[in-house]
Amino acid sequence: MTDAFTTIGLISKPDDPAVAETLGVLCRDLLARGATVLLDETAAAGFERPPAAVLDRQTLAARCDLAIVVGGDGTLLNAARSLVDAEVAVLGVNLGRLGFLADVSPEDMPERLGAILAGEYQEERRTLLHAAIIRDGETLSESDALNDVVVHKWDIARMIELETRIDQRLLNTLRADGLIVSTPTGSTAYALSGGGPILDPALQALVLVPICPHTLSNRPVVVSDRVCIDIRVYGSEDREAQVTCDGQVNFLLGAGDLIRIRRKAQTLRLIHPARHDHFAIMRRKLRWSEQP
Amino acid sequence: MTDAFTTIGLISKPDDPAVAETLGVLCRDLLARGATVLLDETAAAGFERPPAAVLDRQTLAARCDLAIVVGGDGTLLNAARSLVDAEVAVLGVNLGRLGFLADVSPEDMPERLGAILAGEYQEERRTLLHAAIIRDGETLSESDALNDVVVHKWDIARMIELETRIDQRLLNTLRADGLIVSTPTGSTAYALSGGGPILDPALQALVLVPICPHTLSNRPVVVSDRVCIDIRVYGSEDREAQVTCDGQVNFLLGAGDLIRIRRKAQTLRLIHPARHDHFAIMRRKLRWSEQP
Amino acid sequence: MTDAFTTIGLISKPDDPAVAETLGVLCRDLLARGATVLLDETAAAGFERPPAAVLDRQTLAARCDLAIVVGGDGTLLNAARSLVDAEVAVLGVNLGRLGFLADVSPEDMPERLGAILAGEYQEERRTLLHAAIIRDGETLSESDALNDVVVHKWDIARMIELETRIDQRLLNTLRADGLIVSTPTGSTAYALSGGGPILDPALQALVLVPICPHTLSNRPVVVSDRVCIDIRVYGSEDREAQVTCDGQVNFLLGAGDLIRIRRKAQTLRLIHPARHDHFAIMRRKLRWSEQP
Amino acid sequence: MTDAFTTIGLISKPDDPAVAETLGVLCRDLLARGATVLLDETAAAGFERPPAAVLDRQTLAARCDLAIVVGGDGTLLNAARSLVDAEVAVLGVNLGRLGFLADVSPEDMPERLGAILAGEYQEERRTLLHAAIIRDGETLSESDALNDVVVHKWDIARMIELETRIDQRLLNTLRADGLIVSTPTGSTAYALSGGGPILDPALQALVLVPICPHTLSNRPVVVSDRVCIDIRVYGSEDREAQVTCDGQVNFLLGAGDLIRIRRKAQTLRLIHPARHDHFAIMRRKLRWSEQP
């Protein structure tokens, strides 16, 4: 038995009318069960008259002990980055299409909710990355990422040349469209499209996946998540390469900028219903069990 | 025995000091053999005092019967697009690194040159693509490509959604970073990095290679080069996707633009020394014969 | 309008009780429409009392103008090899699971049958391969293949070394588990699992797909189907390599044996209902249209 | 500074005349430096008159504190399995071609040897797998593997169906030619040919790589090396599947046999010269730094 939850924050996919109904049902259900409900601005927009207090994301993070995120995996990625520092537990409710992260359907929610509030759930710790853009020794910008940090060409037609160091040691130089550094969580997202392997979420590892590498033996490399990864883009002019975190946060690179990627100290508390089976979700999402 | 050549145009990689020496030797050698030599502006820039007439590319194309291109595969791609309509024979001299197209080294050139001018050579016909960007039924811009036409995301973080039709029939919709349409010539270039197969240059076929497709069964598809390929980018705003020909010519796409790709009627006359062996070049470039 | 069919041969998957009902319905329907029905031994086994003449496969092939094959793609591969020389038209009825070749379901059959018998159908010509095992200049054994000819290691733990020549010219040597030579028809079968591209059935091409190659740049190669492919297994002892046609016909190789693969002169007449769409079958079989 | 070595066992590739000279030089050098030298039978065969005591492998393992293995990676794999239980340090000398494991050349050996004997070296711990074939609850056979345990089809033409469980939980069922379970050490060997990622040797992980899977989304999966992997071959008759350890030790499977794979408790003490750089060996072996 794990901790029970009493103050629940609601966060949702913005600007999606489909979300309003699910939010409404969920909010009424929580209030009926005696929970304190807080809404962030995305969730409040789903109500004509918000039935609970509306807070900015950081205040909500500080006050709730469980955040329920209604949307898809993209919404949860966004929420995870803003909630991880406050150590809030996070539960994802998907809008019809099973996600790797948002793995509870609106239909199952009423049945699951009582058990979860009462402390019957599974909690996993998911690793995040922290990426910093460093110029002349100073950090210009930084961001967390739950899925991946991608360094990729920008505003130019073809390949860029990347040098990667692992704990200061040269791993390789790479001519490619870019390089994906992915957590186990991200290994079923963009990294998989790029040809990377699937990492078990429990594995303390990262994978570096080259995007369309010129040299065919430049294959994905899996390393411990305790390493420091330094990436430089060679010979590029300003604005010819970009860093993207979770496909959502972007930084344009100047010539000579260093991208430093480390495991973030805080981990995400991801909540699943009891008897959650990650492999079963993979089999269903990747259609492993079906015969075409 | 094939036709002898008497008027030779010289084209070179621009702004590369390494090219000047090779050009000088080549030019003297051609004049000593009694050939008429014409220089385009890139080649003329390699001489303090150009030793032959300097013409713009189109006039040169109209007057010479053989163009010798000094540089790498990239220089030859550029030259090929500007020479193909004039049906000029094209020979590539590489600057030290063997190319798939520029397959004569400066060292071998003096020995090869006499034979080639005398008509002892092999001539291949290489297929080009023609790409047109069509908006509301009108062609906005168009370009040829010897290697590939690539439709790819631009100025956005993640995937675009493409619909591809072959001779008006729906092939598929695709969520990906982009789609490469490649000739056999281009199949050893960017398409290979994207996971495509190698097409024999003699094959009358094209290959469609998805770049980092979301659906893992979206694999490269090889079709006849007689088809008409229509690609639309779905749901994109202006400037979220781009078309690139041979990595050198770019067009930004507006929402709803259609990209129509067909085989170009004219083919490139690519010249090789006698006893040229394309497979031997592949084995050497792709290091098939070596043991690591 | 194409030719009408009057004499119909029935062939089925052997030893499958599920096939009997479909065969019974089909046979009654054909007789009711006035067709002459012939059964081969596999189909006859589906009836307690065969309602039509029972013939061996070759006699059936000689007498019927359409063969309906009830089973899956595997049954159709087997039937195709035995019917191709007689130039019989072949139609595949699948048992519940859509096939690339057996693309009519038992449920749709009654509705389709009248039209097909009346000559309303599409006819495609599918290329087959012919493989010969040659020792000391003599052909030891030979077989046709509609999907693929595979040369693979046998009874040894690791890789074999293969030398491949295209029209006598060395393509490469290859250390691998084997090499798949596939028709366009076979490109969606084993060759796809091995990392090969999809070839349009209309394309006059073959693809060579290495199985687990030691050198990572040994990628699939697509060549014209007019070539002669010669494969030798190097340094192997007797019985260390095998040739398999369509996964169904096997020959053990002796040391030094040559495998010669050519396009077969006769092509398979594959029948589809009118308005057949091969791309639609690919989208459905490969789940291109679905969102996971 | 690590421990010095005084008793050195020599093991070599059997039946290779090239090995004799290297062994002779090495043996004289060791004796001149005052070391006690022991030969196993493979090494003794390289001498007309063995200059040192000849012991069977197990006695040699019990008595020496360093084993020097002269050959290639294959020889070292064999030696590793026989030495790991005795906790002997192992150093690999290659015969001309750099290995991932046998990373000292005969030319460098004289220079390196003094330092290594004196305790100036790097020591790595490499994980091995232990595979057991279990029938009706009893272990029929078992073996260790430094690179990989491979379950693959045998004596049948096409795919087998495998069910894999991780710590008793179903991962997936798989139709494929086989499944490779590889250590980080093996990730640059057969698993790489099968499309697997490269695992850093320091990572406590295993990778499961399907061989030619029928379902294209069956991708390599990386898991912790603390798990228990259970594999069953479904619906196979006796002798239709085989288990191979390091490509060297084979077991035929009976219908219903279970293959249980765990990390071996003992790890291999792999010795490298000081300033050894694993990434540099990868760059050289995989030709990452070269331009084709």
Image (cartoon, coloured by chain):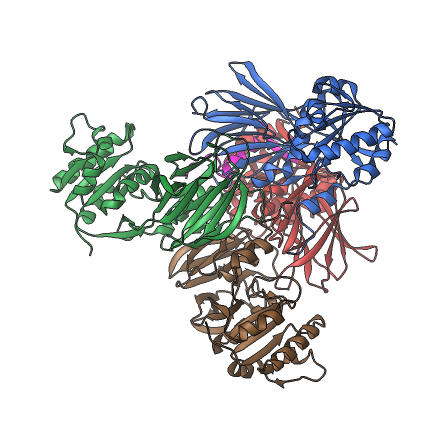
Chain colours: A brown, B red, C blue, D green
Q: Is residue D289 visible?
A: no
**Where does residue B2 sit, x and y in percent of width and height?**
67, 26
**Where does residue B263 sit, x and y in percent of width and height?**
74, 42
> On screen, A279 above or below C104?
below
- Residue A239 as seen in the image, left or right of residue B129: left
Q: Which of C257 and A112 lies nearest the eye of the viewer?
A: A112
Q: Is residue B264 visible?
A: yes
Give the farthest residue toward the bottom: A53
At 50% from the left and 20% from the top, the residue drawn is C257
Give the farthest residue toward the left: D34
**Where does residue D99 sit, x and y in percent of width and height?**
35, 41
Start and end of the magenta stretch?
B270-292
Per the image, is B196 magenta?
no
> On screen, D62 above or below C178?
below
Quadrant position of the C terminus of chain C in the picture: bottom right
Quadrant position of the N terminus of chain C in the picture: top right
Q: Which of C57 and A90 lies nearest the eye of the viewer?
A: C57
Per the image, is B278 magenta?
yes
Q: Which of A172 and B280 lies nearest the eye of the viewer?
A: A172
Q: Which of A288 and A28 lies nearest the eye of the viewer?
A: A28
- In which quarter of the view is residue D98 placed? top left
- Residue A63 as seen in the image, left or right of residue D121: right
